[in-house]
Image: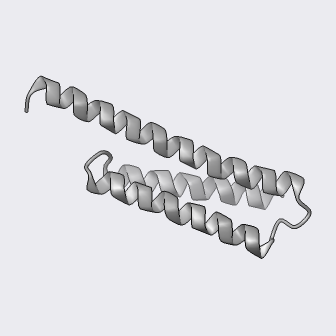
Amino acid sequence: MSKRWYFINYDLHEKALQLLNNDSKKIVKLMEVQLNNLSLPKCPLYEEVLDTLIFGFSCKIDFAVQMGLITKSKGTKLLHDLEKKLSALYSNF
């Protein structure tokens, strides 16, 4: 493997992690807004939107893993961390 290929691969890895972390932060922010501003934390419509966002996030992780941009264990950790943050937010409400 050439040195140039390593740097391109590393850059794509870092960019993929950055994008996935940004998506995770957006989902957590949406949950915070829901809990802080709306009177129904268990709104079925909101829960459906949140489920859809988490599903989309997991699809992005799967894609990044399949492309070799991140490892499967890193993808699993990203999804687990998001679920943990959302659970903590919800339990503190």
Residue shown at the point (31%, 30%) measured from the top left: 11
Rendered image quadrant of residue 9:
top left
Q: Residue at x 38, y 49 (%)?
A: 74
26 left or right of 44 in image = left
Percent of width and height locating residue 77: 45, 52
* Picture quadrant where residue 92 is located: bottom right
- Which residue, as the protein is rendered here, is positioned at the far top? 3
Left or right placement of residue 57 versus residue 9 in this view: right
Question: Can you give x and y, in whole percent of width and height, for residue 4 in the image?
Answer: 15, 24
Relative image position of residue 61 (x, y in whole percent): 41, 55
Q: Residue at x 30, y 45 (%)?
A: 69
Residue drawn at (48%, 51%), measured in percent from left and top?
Answer: 78
Give left or right: position of 19 versus 24.
left
Number of marks in the image?
0
Q: Say above or below: 64 vs 62.
A: above
Residue 69 in view (yes/no): yes
Q: Is residue 88 left or right of residue 1?
A: right
Q: Quadrant of the N terminus?
A: top left
